Image (cartoon, rainbow, N blue to C red):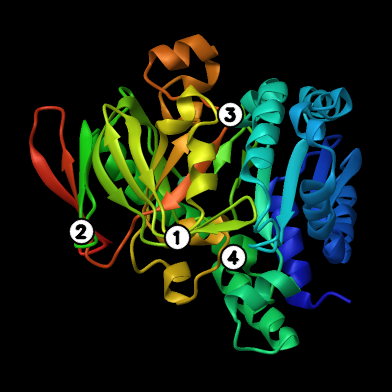
Amino acid sequence: MLTPKQKEYMRLLVEVGVNIQQGQKLIISCQVENAEFARECQRIAYENGCQEVIMRWIDDPTTRMKYLHAADEVFDTCPEWLVRFMTDYSREGAATLHLVSDDPESLLGVDPSRLARWAKVSGEALKEYREMMMRNENAWSIGALSAPAWAKKVFPELPEAEAIEALWDKIFTAVRVLGDGSAVGNWQKHAAKLKERMHILNEYNFKALRYRNALGTDFTVELAENHVWEAGGDVTTKGVPFMPNMPTEEIFTAPRKTGANGVVMASMPLCLKGTIINDIRFVFENGKIIEATASSGEALLREEIALDEGASFLGEVALVPYDSPIRQAQVLFYETLYDENASCHLAFGEAYPSCIKGGTAMSKDESKAAGLNDSITHVDFMLGTEDLSIVGITQDGVEMPVFVDGLFAF
Ligand code: ZN
Ligand code: ZN
């Protein structure tokens, strides 16, 4: 039985997250252990006139067994049915809802080359699907559900049942669900607030941002020409508003592919493909990562930035103040959806076409020519700290504070 808060949250994901439309199809991915949440989302989707819900069940232990024991050649071909499944439904305009509750270490110790080979073949095979998603042709949304393995990683000191409850509490706070039916209104207010700062950043139209902190980050990134800062949700190419991430605290844009220089020290661990990567240090030169080290998970990190040419260049610059409600939760979530919304971050890999003017109508070649990075991957990593300073450099070279001591200067 779902609690009233859980039900309100599922409604929020379906009606605001993917904003399901009459006659539209909906794909839901969900861990089997959380099936009742997926069923509730299905019920709400049908209530809203959804044509058909298509389920993609996920099971962490099954995935782990496959990576450990399946024949090696399995990781070198993406089956045609999967390509058809993802691409055909997207062409038909299906929305996608990802209910995530992954065990952060479900793939610990798995051969990183198997993960990388699969990422490469599936990334290439699913190119059309991915491009449609990145261009916002259809609504998509990611929301998290508490689950035993994840909750125990976040709250190792608590017994399992209490850890699951504690994680639910953090999730509800972050997604502004109080259980009194106010969630949709709370989100409208929150999105409007994010957009106020987004407008200010768009007015400034900075040429570059310079980051510094005591951790050792000393880094400058140029922003794409005609870049657009985005926040508080997106609109599909068909004009339907949706919320790609719930929660969301970030204001983000696209860097110029070749414009990153200097040292970036990650300020939080990164959970990537069922493995935790600690103490990432990147050195950038003319946009490219020329050095990548980590105190754990380094092999996986190196495989990831070598997936294709664009994987070692940046695709996103995102600003999140140090006092974000998710940071104030004072826990490390080991889930990028949450941790990236607690901290200023960057992403290496693909850039969002919507982050430059007219970008969603551009062909791949046009967006590349406009300076946007292209890759089969997109991985956010966190660099925000309490003492982070970011200076914006205007088109005429004037410097002005954007972040002072981890917080917005305006
Ligand atoms: Zn982001
Ligand atoms: Zn991102």
Q: Which residue is mark 1?
A: 278
Q: Earlier in the sequence, mark 1 or mark 2?
A: 2
Q: Which residue is mark 2?
A: 213
The residue sitting at 84% across, 38% down in the picture is 71
Disc 1 to disc 2, C-alpha distance:
18 Å
Q: Which residue is mark 3?
A: 376
Q: For disc 2, does the CB lie below 8 Å from ligand 1?
A: no
Say which element carries label 3: loop
Front label number (3 vs 1): 1
Q: Which residue is mark 4?
A: 175
The type of residue carrying mark 3 is Ile
Q: Earlier in the sequence, mark 3 or mark 4?
A: 4
Q: In which image quadrant can residue 166 be found?
A: bottom right
Q: Earlier in the sequence, mark 1 or mark 4?
A: 4
The residue sitting at 69% across, 20% down in the picture is 128
- Structural crowding at the residue carrying mark 3, measured as other residues with C-alpha within 10 Å and reported as few (<14), some (14–19) or many (≥20): many
Per the rendering, the mark at residue 170 is none
Say which element carries label 1: loop
The type of residue carrying mark 2 is Asn
Disc 3 to disc 4, C-alpha distance:
29 Å
Answer yes or no: is residue 281 visible.
yes
Disc 4 to disc 2, C-alpha distance:
30 Å
Front label number (4 vs 2): 2
Residue 293 or 241: which is nearer the viewer? 293
The type of residue carrying mark 1 is Asn
Say which element carries label 2: loop
